[in-house]
Image (cartoon, rainbow, N blue to C red):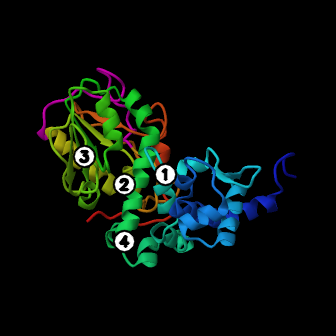
C-alpha cells in the first residue's frame, strides 16, 4: 500500500514517463523567450504569439502545459506571466535558460536514447552523435554556447557559498581549471583583493567569455597542462565527468603546475589546516565519462603535500557533496574527451 496523501504507484510511473515532455516544455519556453517577453508586464497569448512568431492556439496549449508544471500562471483576465520558478528562465545573471536549452537539445537528449546500451558498456555519445560530445559541440556552436552558459548559470547558484567557505583571502594567484566563463573565479577574487586569477578551458569556451578585471582567460587542454604558479587550483564541475585514471591525470597536471610556482599554504580547512582528503572540487552534471566499475567507491584524492587545493562543490560548506558527485554516471565511457 502506498502512503496516504501520495499518488498511487502507477500515477507516479506515468509522471516519470512524461519527464522527457517536461524537458521539452522547458526548452520551448526558453527558445521562445517567454520569460523575457513577460518580464515587464503580463501579456496576452495573442500578443506573445506575435512576439514569438508562434501559432496562437498552439502557443496556448504550450502555456497550459507549462501552467500545470508550475512555470506559468494566468491572471483573472487571462494574461500570461511567469511563476517564481518559471522566472528562472529569464535571461540575466544566474539564469537557467541556457540549462533548459542545453538539456532539451540533441547533444544531451540523443545519448540518453542509448542508456540501456550504455549500461552494457557501449559509448552512448559516439552511438548517438557519431563522436564525443566536445567534438559535437564544436560542430554545433549554438549547443556548445548553451552548455557553457548552463555551467555559468549553475556556478552562479553556488559561487557565493563557495567563496564564503573557501578562505582564499590571502591568496596571490587562483587558477580555475575548466572554469568556463569565470563565474566562480569572479566570486573568489571578490574575497581575495590581492589575488590575480586565470581560467583554463577549451579555446572555443574562453574566446566567448566576457572580460573581467584581474582574470586572464587561457585556452588549452587540462589533461596535458594547466597554468603554473597558482597557490590555489579550483576544480568545479570537472572531475565527476572523468574515469579514475583521467581524474588522476588532471590532478597530476595541477600538482606539476603548482610545483613550478611558489610554495603555498594548504587550503580547504582554513588557515594552516590541510584540505580534507577526498574533497577534490566536483559538482554539477555527469553526462558521461565515468568508467568506474559498478559498486566501487571513488578513491580519496589527497592534496599534494605543501600545495593548495580548493574543493568546490554544490552547497555549503563548499565540498560537502564532492564524493557523491563522483558516483558513476549512467552513461558510461569517455564522452567528455578533451581534444
User: Where does the image place residue 52, in percent across and percent down from the top left?
Assistant: 54, 66
Relative to 132, residue 5 above or below:
above
Relative to 254, residue 161 above or below:
above
Label 3: which residue?
A: 211
Q: Is label 3 or label 2 in front?
A: 3
Q: Quadrant of residue 158?
A: top left
Q: Who is closer to the viewer here, 43 or 155? A: 43
Can you see residue 50? yes
Q: Is label 4 or label 1 in front?
A: 4
Disc with the residue nearer the chain's start (1 vs 3) = 3
Residue 296 located left or right of residue 223:
right
Q: Magenta stretch: give its range.
A: 260-281
Task: Write the residue at 36% across / 26% down.
Answer: 269
Q: Is label 1 or label 3 in front?
A: 3
* Alpha carbons under labels 3 and 2: distance apart: 34 Å
Label 2: which residue?
A: 244
* Alpha carbons under labels 4 and 3: distance apart: 24 Å
| SS category of the residue bearing label 4 | loop
| SS category of the residue bearing label 2 | helix
Disc with the residue nearer the chain's start (4 vs 3) = 4
Labelled disc at residue 140: 4
Residue farthest top in this picture: 272
- As for residue 264 lying within the magenta part, the answer is yes
Disc with the residue nearer the chain's start (4 vs 1) = 4
Task: Write the residue at 37% across / 35% down.
Answer: 277
Amino acid at each position: 500500500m502506498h502512503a496516504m496523501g501520495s499518488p498511487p504507484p502507477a500515477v507516479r510511473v506515468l509522471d516519470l514517463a512524461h519527464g522527457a515532455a517536461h524537458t521539452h516544455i522547458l526548452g520551448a519556453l526558453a527558445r521562445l523567450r517567454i520569460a523575457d517577453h513577460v518580464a515587464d508586464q503580463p501579456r496576452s497569448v495573442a500578443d506573445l504569439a506575435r512576439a514569438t512568431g508562434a501559432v496562437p492556439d498552439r502557443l496556448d496549449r504550450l502555456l497550459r502545459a507549462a501552467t500545470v508544471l508550475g512555470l506559468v500562471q494566468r491572471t483573472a483576465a487571462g494574461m500570461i506571466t511567469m511563476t517564481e520558478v518559471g522566472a528562472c528562465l529569464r535571461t540575466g545573471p544566474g539564469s537557467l535558460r541556457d540549462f533548459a536549452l542545453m538539456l532539451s537539445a540533441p547533444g544531451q537528449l540523443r545519448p540518453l536514447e542509448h542508456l540501456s546500451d550504455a549500461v552494457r558498456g557501449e559509448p552512448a555519445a559516439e552511438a548517438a552523435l557519431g563522436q564525443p560530445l566536445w567534438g559535437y559541440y564544436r560542430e554545433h556552436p549554438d549547443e556548445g554556447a548553451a552548455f557553457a552558459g548552463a555551467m555559468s548559470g549553475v556556478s552562479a547558484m553556488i559561487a557565493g557559498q563557495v567563496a564564503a567557505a573557501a578562505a582564499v583571502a590571502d591568496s596571490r594567484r587562483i587558477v580555475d581549471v575548466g572554469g568556463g566563463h569565470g563565474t566562480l573565479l569572479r566570486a573568489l577574487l571578490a574575497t581575495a583583493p590581492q589575488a590575480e586569477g586565470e581560467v583554463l578551458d577549451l579555446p572555443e569556451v574562453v574566446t566567448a567569455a566576457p572580460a573581467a578585471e584581474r582574470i586572464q582567460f587561457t585556452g588549452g587542454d587540462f589533461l596535458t597542462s594547466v597554468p603554473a604558479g597558482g597557490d590555489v587550483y579550483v576544480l568545479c564541475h570537472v572531475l565527476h565527468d572523468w574515469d579514475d585514471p583521467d581524474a588522476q591525470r588532471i590532478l597530476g597536471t595541477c600538482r606539476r603546475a603548482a610545483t613550478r610556482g611558489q610554495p603555498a599554504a594548504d587550503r580547504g580547512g582554513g588557515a594552516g589546516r590541510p584540505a580534507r582528503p577526498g574533497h577534490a572540487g566536483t559538482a554539477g552534471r555527469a553526462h558521461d565519462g565515468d568508467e568506474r566499475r559498478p559498486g566501487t567507491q571513488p578513491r580519496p584524492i589527497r592534496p599534494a603535500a605543501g600545495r593548495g587545493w580548493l574543493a568546490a562543490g554544490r552547497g555549503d560548506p563548499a565540498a560537502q557533496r564532492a564524493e557523491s558527485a563522483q558516483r558513476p554516471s549512467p552513461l558510461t565511457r569517455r564522452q567528455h574527451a578533451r581534444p
